[in-house]
Amino acid sequence: MKRRTIPLALVALVAACFLAIPALSQEDMTTIPDQGFAAHTRLPAVFNHDAHNEKAGISDCTTCHHGEKDGKRDPSQDTSGIPCSDCHTAAGKPGRTPLMRAFHEQCMGCHMAKKKGPVTCGDCHRPVK
């Protein structure tokens, strides 16, 4: 009996490991990355990237992650994976939108235009559940 149980247990363990890989491959973002801010006046904005995009029907990354060309926003360049604070700083750079305003214009601007989604401070800046 033991001769059969151990190999079956090993097969089950290996199968469980393979099934767990997709769950571990990418964590859902629960707050917007905020490493570009020196100090916080509010909690970080709660944001689940994948759930948001699915609900909003967003499949094109450049809808939110845009590049820049000749000092102007260029949505043809996908900047996914590059922190917003690489280009937008808390203090602001000449010709660049400051980081906080960039976040707020990006999110609230879209929500107001579509008349959907949160637009008040407490709707986004709240404790993570």
Image (tube, grey):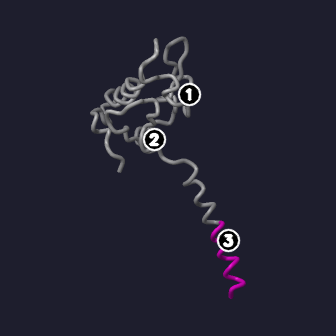
Q: Residues within 10 Å of mark 1 (few under 14, many from 20)?
A: some
Q: Position of residue 122 (x, y in %)?
A: 27, 38
Going by the numbered disc 1, the residue's amino acid type is Asp
Determine the CA span between mark 2 and mark 1.
Answer: 16 Å
Residue 68: x %, y % from top left: 53, 18
Disc 3/disc 2 C-alpha distance (Å): 35 Å
Q: Main secondary structure of the magenta part?
A: helix
Query: In the structure shown, which secondary structural element does the residue marked by tag 2 occupy?
Result: helix
Q: In this view, does 2 lie above or below 56?
A: below
Amino acid type for the residue under numbered disc 3: Val
Horizontal and vertical percent for residue 50? 47, 43
Closer to the chain start, of discs 3 and 2, is 3
Mark 3 neighbour density, 10 Å: few (under 14) some (14–19) many (20 or more): few
Q: Is mark 3 on a helix, strand or loop?
A: helix
Residue at far right of view: 3
Question: Residue 97 got which mark?
Answer: none
Q: Which residue is drawn at 55% across and 28% down?
A: 79
Task: Describe residue 1's horizontal placement relative to residue 113 as left or right.
Answer: right
Q: What stretch is highlighted in magenta?
A: 1-14
Q: Does the magenta stretch include residue 12?
A: yes
Residues marked 3 and 2 touching at CB (< 8 Å): no
Element carrying mark 1? loop
Q: Nearer the viewer, residue 53 or 81?
A: 81
User: In the rendered image, which residue does mark 2 sit on?
Assistant: 49
